[in-house]
Image: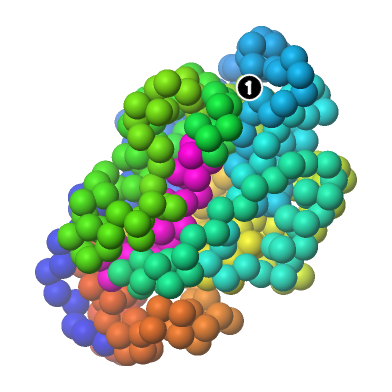
């Protein structure tokens, strides 16, 4: 390992690390805000979600939206991005059975699917849904994954491109104006509050939140062709406008509860959790579709000091499922756990060595988050208490 050095933060993080007094989240999460009482914006929103919003009125808004888009001839009238996981399954089944819509469900292929992930997707489709899988050129995907690890500190960036752009592309191709996602992660987990009190999101915000503001030219300059990138990129803004494409969130219309979604999907679409907890956290039912999923979360831990257990525990504290004390214990036990199970496969996929991977990790550490101690180990300078 290398000695701690003056590495400028890639995301302009606050130099002073603070933790929310109510949950386990820190101010190092991009775009999150803390109020004068030390409460993070996600907790402020959660208090409104649980105690202030008129959910009956919001459900009526959803019914009105469904009446506007519902097809008269039984054709598809809404796009639902869904991997077969608990959340997308909940959204699709709710729209179909409670609102009489006919969803076209869309999945972007995992880098390396898990057996349970494939089983859940198959069970979901067999429960009564039409489905399209987007599968890009695997060699281009491997190159983008390796280059994203180096250039962006996140091997999942090409997956994020496809996961968010492919549904828009299918919507334009099929002439379907409405795309319904599950949760608005910016408000549920902490981030840009611009759209906190509205059901939809501007496409330009969609780009900025998920693609770090990177233009296509960034990758063209790295030697990729427009043909290489075509599957990963969305439709033109002109075609989006002509199609009147709208991105909405079910979490605006119905109180979002990931644990309740799990039980719902288990009952109605055959969803099954993993046999063991996911590395880096304590849960068994979230983000279990891809064998390389853990490396996305581990790099987030390296860059921001925030791992899967922090995000999971913070949300469950806000939902009243666990106490902050329990959350702190879970974070201290599981956050930053190395995803060792598929590490050798990941190195082979990216065509890099263990040593190269460790050097990449060091390049993405910020000195205000990490310290290299006397025992030759990297340690967080400040942890949640």
Q: Quadrant of the N terminus?
A: bottom left
The quadrant holding residue 288 is: bottom right
Vertical side of 151 occupied by 11: above or below: above
- The magenta segment is 148-169
Can you give x and y, in whole percent of width and height, for residue 341 in the image?
58, 81
Vertical comparison of 38 with 219: above or below: above
Relative side of 385 to 219, left or right: right
What colouring does the structure picture have?
Answer: rainbow
- Residue at 70%, 57% (x, y): give it: 285
Q: Is residue 76 in view? A: yes
Q: Nearer the viewer, residue 257 or 135?
A: 135
SS state under label 1: helix
For image coordinates 43% across by 72% down, the residue present is 139
Q: Would residue 220 be counted in the magenta stretch?
A: no
For this view, does 196 lie left or right of residue 227?
A: right
**Most distant residue in the left direction:** 6
**Quadrant the C terminus occupies:** bottom left
Which x, y percent locates residue 43? 49, 35
Q: Can residue 91 be seen at all in this image of the molecule?
A: no
Residue 45 at x, y = what percent? 50, 29
Residues packed near mark 1 inside 10 Å, few (<14), some (14 to 19) or many (20 plus): many
Q: Residue at x 72, y 70 (%)?
A: 115
Observer-nearest residue: 232 or 360? 232
Q: Residue at x 72, y 36 (%)?
A: 92
Q: Residue furthest right?
A: 267
149 is within the stretch colored magenta: yes
Total marks in image: 1
The residue labelled by disc 1 is: 253
Magenta span: helix, strand or loop, mainly?
helix
Where on the picture, by quarter, is residue 382?
bottom left
287 vs 129, left or right, is left
Q: Could you say where residue 261 lies in the image, as x and y percent from the top left?
A: 73, 42
């Amino acid at each position: 390992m290398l000695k701690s050095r003056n590495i400028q933060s890639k995301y302009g993080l606050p130099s002073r690390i603070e933790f929310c007094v109510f949950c386990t989240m820190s101010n190092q999460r991009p775009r999150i805000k803390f109020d004068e009482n030390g409460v993070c914006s996600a907790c402020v929103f959660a208090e409104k979600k649980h105690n202030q919003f008129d959910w009956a009125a919001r459900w009526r808004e959803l019914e009105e939206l469904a009446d506007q888009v519902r097809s008269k001839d039984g054709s598809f009238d809404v796009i639902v991005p869904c991997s077969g996981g608990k959340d997308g399954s909940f959204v699709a089944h709710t729209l179909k059975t409670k609102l009489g819509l006919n969803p076209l469900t869309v999945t972007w292929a995992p880098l390396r699917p898990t057996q349970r992930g494939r089983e859940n997707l198959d069970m979901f489709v067999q429960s009564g849904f039409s489905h399209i899988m987007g599968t890009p050129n695997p060699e281009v995907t491997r190159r983008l994954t390796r280059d994203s690890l180096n250039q962006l500190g996140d091997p999942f960036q090409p997956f994020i491109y496809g996961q968010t752009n492919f549904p828009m592309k299918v919507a334009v191709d099929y002439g379907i104006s409405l795309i319904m996602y599950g949760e608005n992660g910016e408000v549920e987990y902490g981030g840009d509050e611009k759209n906190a009190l509205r059901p939809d999101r501007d496409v330009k915000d969609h780009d900025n939140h998920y693609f770090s503001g990177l233009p296509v030219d960034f990758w063209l300059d790295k030697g990729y062709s427009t043909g290489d990138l075509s599957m990963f990129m969305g439709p033109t803004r002109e075609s989006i406008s002509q199609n009147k494409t709208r991105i909405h969130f079910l979490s605006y219309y119905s109180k979002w509860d990931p644990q309740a979604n799990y039980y719902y999907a288990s009952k109605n679409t055959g969803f099954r959790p993993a046999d063991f907890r996911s590395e880096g956290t304590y849960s068994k039912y979230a983000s279990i579709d891809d064998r390389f999923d853990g490396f996305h979360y581990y790099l987030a831990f390296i860059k921001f000091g925030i791992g899967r257990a922090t995000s999971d525990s913070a949300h469950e504290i806000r939902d009243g499922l666990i106490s902050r004390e329990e959350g702190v214990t879970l974070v201290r036990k599981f956050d930053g756990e190395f995803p060792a199970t598929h590490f050798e496969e990941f190195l082979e996929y990216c065509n890099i060595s263990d040593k190269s991977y460790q050097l990449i990790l060091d390049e993405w550490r910020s000195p205000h988050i990490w310290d290299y101690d006397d025992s030759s180990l990297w340690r967080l300078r400040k942890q949640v208490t």
